[in-house]
């Protein structure tokens, strides 16, 4: 978007303005960044991992098992060696397992995907702890590359007062976020930002365009950039902050209401995603469009979610529980069983154990 072409109908200036906003949000120096408006968060991840592969062709990609599927899709597309690292019960990457895996491959560059909010549990990997692991293992800066998948929470994190900083002032290389979630763009889109030096490795001159090719898709939706620009201008920093505070507080309200109702649920400290036991009635799942994984479901609280809506949701869940019973853990290490783990902090309502007669 920073280089003109022969095509006169475009929204480049709006796209550049959007990129400038996020570069400032993530504390990137004026002349050091490059980015563009993507078609979705997945494209941002594909672009970030492509740059990592081009910078380190023989590198190994490390990411947690609870990572969004697009990261491992990128590894397949680019024929990269990838390691799926186990996770802690609340969804963060297992830091000891990560360190052990990197130690096995110290002769090869390290490529790490850091999750700024996992898909199901909204868990945020501890960037500072990961950087400490790299330092402890004596991995020099030129031998590692860090991409941050921030689909939802990387846009919210700068506005959470108690959140640790995730920015380009630290040795990260790229961030990808979605634009159709927190900012409410009516079509799927996202933002990808990286260090300008990395983009040179994929840049190609296209004569008939009188421009260069640096993106995944080539032709892109100019209306997405227009809407993102409009949303940012309309909300402003103060408006986004209000939305973030609303989401965080409303998620805590949902967690508390579910717990009062005797339902198992959890909420990570840096998240607006409430994880709960899966309702037994599929009609409830379809009515509320719940995303489920085995024996759990989750609710992602966005600016449009109100306490009134939550009260109605919890009321229907209680009716479902009274009519159909409660979900039992599928196995000893199932996602629902992990919600009981004390590492989440606080307390959870444990599923009621089935009697012998109910089981057999």
Image: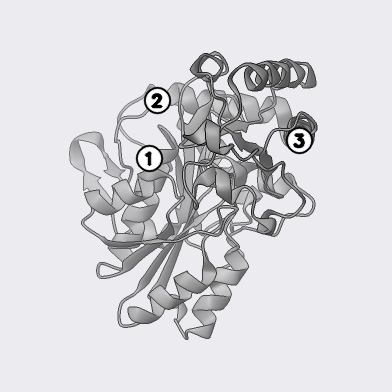
Q: Is residue 251 above or below residue 65?
A: above
- The earlier-in-sequence mark between 3 and 1 is 1
Q: Residues within 10 Å of mark 3 (few under 14, many from 20)?
A: some
Q: Position of residue 163 (x, y in %)?
A: 73, 54
Q: Say the numbered circle drawn on residue 259.
A: 3
Front residue of 147/307: it is 307
Q: Is residue 244 left or right of residue 85?
A: right
> Where does label 1 land, which residue?
43
Query: Is there CB contact under 8 Å for labels 3 and 1?
Result: no
| Mark toward the start of the polypeptide (2 vs 3) | 2
Numbered label tally: 3
Classify residue 268 as left or right of residue 286. right
Element under label 1?
helix
Q: Quadrant of the N terminus?
A: top left
Which of 146/93 is in front? 93
Please name the residue shown 54% across and 33% down the image. 357
Would you place residue 171 above or below residue 88 in this image?
A: below
Q: Name the residue tied to disc 2.
A: 221
* Residue in view at x 73 percent, y 31 percent: 258
**Mark nearer the viewer, 3 or 1:** 3
Residue beneath the point at 40% across and 81% down: 103
Q: Quadrant of residue 121?
A: top right
Q: Position of residue 257 (x, y in %)?
A: 78, 30
**Front of the two marks 2 and 3:** 3
Residue extending farthest front? 357
């Amino acid at each position: 978007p920073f280089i003109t072409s022969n095509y006169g109908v475009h929204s480049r200036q709006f796209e550049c303005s959007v990129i400038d906003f996020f570069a400032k949000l993530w504390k990137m120096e004026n002349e050091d960044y490059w980015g563009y408006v993507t078609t979705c968060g997945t494209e941002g991840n594909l672009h970030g991992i492509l740059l990592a592969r081009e910078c380190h062709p023989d590198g190994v990609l490390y990411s947690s098992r609870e990572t969004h599927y697009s990261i491992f899709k990128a590894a397949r597309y680019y024929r990269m060696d990838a390691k799926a690292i186990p996770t802690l019960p609340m969804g963060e990457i297992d830091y000891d397992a990560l360190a052990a895996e990197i130690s096995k491959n110290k002769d090869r560059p390290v490529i790490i995907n850091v999750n700024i909010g996992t898909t199901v549990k909204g868990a945020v990997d501890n960037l500072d702890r990961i950087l400490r692991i790299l330092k402890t293992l004596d991995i020099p800066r030129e031998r590692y590359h860090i991409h941050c998948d921030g689909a939802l929470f990387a846009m919210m994190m700068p506005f959470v007062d108690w959140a640790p900083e995730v920015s380009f002032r630290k040795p990260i290389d790229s961030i990808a976020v979605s634009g159709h979630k927190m900012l409410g763009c009516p079509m799927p889109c996202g933002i990808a930002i990286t260090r300008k030096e990395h983009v040179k490795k994929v840049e190609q001159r296209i004569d008939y365009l009188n421009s260069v090719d640096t993106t995944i898709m080539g032709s892109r939706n100019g209306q997405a950039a227009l809407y993102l620009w409009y949303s940012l201008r309309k909300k402003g920093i103060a408006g986004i902050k209000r939305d973030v505070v609303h989401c965080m507080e409303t998620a805590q309200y949902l967690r508390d209401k579910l717990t009062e109702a005797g339902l198992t649920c959890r909420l990570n400290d840096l998240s607006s995603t409430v994880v709960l036991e899966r309702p037994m009635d599929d009609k409830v799942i379809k009515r509320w469009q719940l995303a489920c994984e085995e024996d759990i479901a989750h609710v992602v609280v966005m600016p449009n979610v109100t306490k009134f809506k939550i009260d109605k949701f919890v009321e229907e869940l209680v009716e479902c529980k009274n009519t159909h019973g409660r979900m039992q853990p599928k196995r000893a290490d199932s996602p629902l069983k992990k919600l009981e783990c004390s590492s989440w902090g606080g307390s959870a309502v444990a599923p009621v154990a089935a009697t012998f007669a109910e089981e057999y």
